Amino acid sequence: MNLAAHKVPYWGSDIQKLFQELGSSPSGLSEEEAQSRLKNQKGTSIAKMKTHRALGILINQYKSPLVLILVFATAVSIALGEWDEASVVLAILFISSLFSFVQEFQAASAVAKLLARVVIQTTVLRNGSKVNIPSSEVVKGDIVLLSAGSLIPADGVLFESKDLFVNQAILTGESFPAEKNVGTSLENAAIAERQNCIFMGTSVRSGVATMLAVETGTKTQFGEIAKTLEEKPLETEFETGLKHLGQLLIKTMIVFLTVIFFANILLSRPLIDSLLFALALAVGMSPELMPAILTLTLSKAAQKMAKEGVLVKKLNAIENLGSMDVLCADKTGTLTTGVMKLSDVLDPLGENSKEMIVYAALNAQMQSGLSNPMDEAILVYTKKIGQDLTEYQKVDEIPYDFIRKRITIVARHLKEEPDHMIIKGAPSNILEICTSAQIQGKLEALSKNILDNIQNLLAKWGNQGIRVLAVATKEVPRKPAYSRSDEQSFILQGFLLFQDGPHPDAFEALKEMKRLGVALKIVTGDNRYVAKAVAQNVGLEIIGILSGSELQNLAEEALMQKVESTNLFVEVDPHQKERIVNCLMKRKHVVGFLGDGINDASAIHAADVGISVETAVDVAREAAEIVLVQHNLKTLCDGVRAGRVVFANTFKYIFTNTSANFGNMVSMAVASLIFPFLPLLATQVLLNNFLANIPALAI
């Protein structure tokens, strides 16, 4: 099982040899073998590298400039033989650091428990059966099943794939998804050139595949980068403000220290006492417990938010959530319930067509990508009417992607010769590959008159807020495999109409968001008619509409102007969603993005605060810092209020403590210049300041 002795790298090796070397097979590992391997690889997972360690938290307490000043004061006292002075300062330093350590350690433990609720799952084969396990428990030799939206848990090679495209920009910087295929790559191939390999941390954009895991944890390409370069998260607006406050305090302390020290020297005060007194006053001006109080406040807020259905993956995201003034979100599940119901099955002229449900159901049942509300609604409808699909078997599949916006299934009837190619997707994308239509049992060419009638129907349904999918078919001769080149000359069978009612909390949630000062912008791939109808049904005032095709022709500067006067972005693709978010951020807005699909992942990652839901695809949940248990705006409003409580409590401490400390220290500084003696010893100044900080925890 040791690949180190293998001269040919795994991407250049035959798949059967890899199975043999890894002690695995296409049916996967046994559960006993997998558990044994998991024990051996414990300690190499990247998750462990990111876990809060008690020692690390303790060391961090001594990195603050304020603490280093105290360390310097202690060193000076020891060097000059002032042991009593040094002992008291050390005791204060130790107690303060220990107190901060306890608070931060407890906060870290609480956050770890919350994170356990949003662990990413991976589907693997164990003993030949599909099982879902946490991604961190994937081991070498595991057979991993992947589909659109899957986050890849290990480095490995493909031994089955179909139209697989992977987003690996995190490793290669490529803007567009890379196509992957079964086979071998050259031994000296760069990462981007290894067409048969997929890597940990990347995600499946479209297609399906089966992978043999070869490397896990820190042995992966992503792990090697993580070992040498710890990713530093971007500062939140709140953190930037605190940083500037700290810099101001340090500058003030330096001036204060210098003036007081030399003033006391000119007054012929003892050198050491003057130095320690000046240092104590300088340190006394600062809010020393700021890190502990901020961490405690954030962790308490995270625990409170979890009870209200808002799971926080990164504590500093609470600050951005509280300061958010623009929320971008899809309408589905936000303004609507997100529960699809198939209401009508119609032919190309809008008449009932019970025959078409067979084709729609076969496509929905046999597709191997992510389950989605529309397919689930089709299957519920099929079961309700008692439609039998057992006489068909799946032959092939051309998976869904965001360019074609359609999915093709090739099905075979057990008693009929030709295969049936069944395609389902957005009406415009289906119509472009159709040459004829099935109307009342007759095959007719798609004339201009029929197309005009179809467009009128689509506009009518859209204005009613109804979502529509088109279904087309054609008979094809039997062959081993089919490709996108076969997607032509289809027969339009008709349309599936879905209804997704307004969310019962949407109207009140919109009013609450307005009260909170958060502007909602709907960013959706749906057509303008459906999006506009849904927005109007829940009382969202539309100030401007911009479509993806219009957005495509706008330069960056023009889009930056347009995003301010638009709150309904329709028919947009994933890249355009990210552009919208970036332009809003350049306009100095604090932007949140709420999404749950593959097409939302890049925008979620780009936003100041990425928000997803527990039921989202892996890549969307991983990109988010906030995860909602329930997909609705009311829950999010609760999270915004909690974030603002963190702001308020932290500023209470800063204002109260800094103003009180500044007044006390200035009073003692002036007194030291008037009295013929120092009003307080340095240790008394520090002790008084430390004790005064304790009550601030009650805030």
Image (cartoon, rainbow, N blue to C red):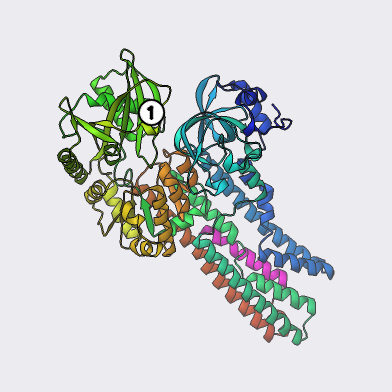
Look at 31% across and 62% down and name the residue there.
565
Q: Position of residue 619 (x, y in %)?
A: 47, 41
Task: Give the class, few, some or many, for how many residues have Cα within 10 Å of label 1's Cα (few <14, many ≥20).
Answer: many
The reply to whether residue 308 is in sight is: no
Q: Position of residue 32 (x, y in %)?
A: 62, 21
Q: Dot 1 lies on which element?
A: loop
Look at 27% across and 41% down and name the residue there.
428
Report the span colored magenta.
680-699
Q: Quadrant of residue 193?
A: top right
Amino acid type of the residue that numbered disc 1 sits on in the rendered structure:
Gln
Residue placed under numbered mark 1 in the picture: 367
Up/down of 563 relative to 598, above or below: below
Up/down of 193 relative to 162, above or below: below
Q: Nearer the viewer, residue 202 or 633?
A: 202
Q: Nearer the viewer, residue 191 or 374?
A: 191
Q: Quadrant of residue 693?
A: bottom right
Q: Position of residue 616 (x, y in %)?
A: 42, 40
